[in-house]
């Protein structure tokens, strides 16, 4: 069942769970996403970064859409971190049901102007829009700019955006030794009180489970996962490929997909997503 982001996130606001958004750049990740969601009877967001779309080619979006139509669980096809209008228009033309325009590095007024323009275009064809306010940290040392509740309220009101990615302490990627992540859950509560639309947390990999679970119960509706699932897949792939006699994809990839699905299912349990497909 193919949905846009507004449709798939609506039950999260009253039933207090979050939907995992798995970065999906290959058919193996897509297979794991759909199978994990079906096994958990849970909604899932298949998100593709512009770099992943360039690698997989535009036709990959049609594969995702077909898989979504052929399953009973809700599936949203989302563009992750669209950098400009060209990225957004490409995704809409490919059939994406949701797009992100990331103007978080821009001054506040420029972020509003860019987001508002994308909202006007996307909403005209039934596509949801995610924006970002504040900046997520990186492992290269970029610092976190925390989202301010009063700015979040103004941003949502002036842009008409459907979901908002906020900065409350996460970083993209896997954390190096010695760097301990910490989520500002009180700040999340303040932002949740200030805006009514679904909130998004980027950089969801490698954070302490207890903090992530509390974030999902406190007001996060969508949570991005990329590094965790890729690590599981490729750790297993390196083990499998030690057998140099293997050369058929059907022999190499299934155990890697299974390891990735274990992580996906664990995230669905942690986010309280498991079993929630009955709400749609």
Image (cartoon, helix red, strand yellow):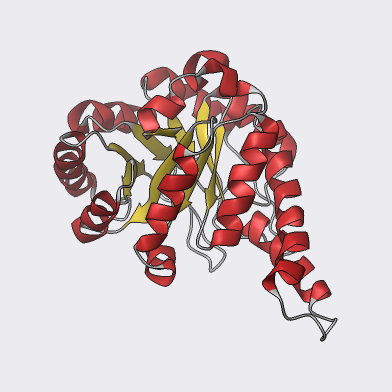
Q: Position of residue 228 (x, y in %)?
A: 67, 55
Q: Kindly identify the residue that appears in the image at 54 percent across and 16 percent down.
A: 279
Q: Is residue 246 above or below residue 143?
A: below
Asked where in the image residue 73 lies, by quadrant, the reply is top right
**Relative to residue 173, is residue 130 drawn left or right?**
left
Q: Is residue 15 above or below residue 127?
A: above
Of residues 153 and 65, the one drawn nearer to the viewer in this rendering:
65
Q: Kindly identify the residue that appears in the image at 44 percent across and 38 percent down.
A: 69
Of residues 57 and 127, the one drawn nearer to the viewer in this rendering:
57
Q: Kindly identify the residue that appears in the image at 78 percent across and 66 percent down.
A: 236
**Relative to residue 138, is residue 96 drawn left or right?**
left
Number of labels in the image equals 0
**Relative to residue 178, is residue 160 drawn left or right?**
left
Q: Is residue 186 above or below residue 252?
A: above
Q: Residue furthest bottom?
A: 244
Q: Position of residue 6 (x, y in %)?
A: 36, 28
Q: Residue furthest top?
A: 14
Q: Position of residue 185 (x, y in %)?
A: 58, 30
Q: Kindly identify the residue that appears in the image at 23 percent across and 44 percent down.
A: 108
- The answer to whether residue 178 is visible is no
- The answer to whether residue 66 is visible is yes
Q: Position of residue 170 (x, y in %)?
A: 56, 48
């Amino acid at each position: 069942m193919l949905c846009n982001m507004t449709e798939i996130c609506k039950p999260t606001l009253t039933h207090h769970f979050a939907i995992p958004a798995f970065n999906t750049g290959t058919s193996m990740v897509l297979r794991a996403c759909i199978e994990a969601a079906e096994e958990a009877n849970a909604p899932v967001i298949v998100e593709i970064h512009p770099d992943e779309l360039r690698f997989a080619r535009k036709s990959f979006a049609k594969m995702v859409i077909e898989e979504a139509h052929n399953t009973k669980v809700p599936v949203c096809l989302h563009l992750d971190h669209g950098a400009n209008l060209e990225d957004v228009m490409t995704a809409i033309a490919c059939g994406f049901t949701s797009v992100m325009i990331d103007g978080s590095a821009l001054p506040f007024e420029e972020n509003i102007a860019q987001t508002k323009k994308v909202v006007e275009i996307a909403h005209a064809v039934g596509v949801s829009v995610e924006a970002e306010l504040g900046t997520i940290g990186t492992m290269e040392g970029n610092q976190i700019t925390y989202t301010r509740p009063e700015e979040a309220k103004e941003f949502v009101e002036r842009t008409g955006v459907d979901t908002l990615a906020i900065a409350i302490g996460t970083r993209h990627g896997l954390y190096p030794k010695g760097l301990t992540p910490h989520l500002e859950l009180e700040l999340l509560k303040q932002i949740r009180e200030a805006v009514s639309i679904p909130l998004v947390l980027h950089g969801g990999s490698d954070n302490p489970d207890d903090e992530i679970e509390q974030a999902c119960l406190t007001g996060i509706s969508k949570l991005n996962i990329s590094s965790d699932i890729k690590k599981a897949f490729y750790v297993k792939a390196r083990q499998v490929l030690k057998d140099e006699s293997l050369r058929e994809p059907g022999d190499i990839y299934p155990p890697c997909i299974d390891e990735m699905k274990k992580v996906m299912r664990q995230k669905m349990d942690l986010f309280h997503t498991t079993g929630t497909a009955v709400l749609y």
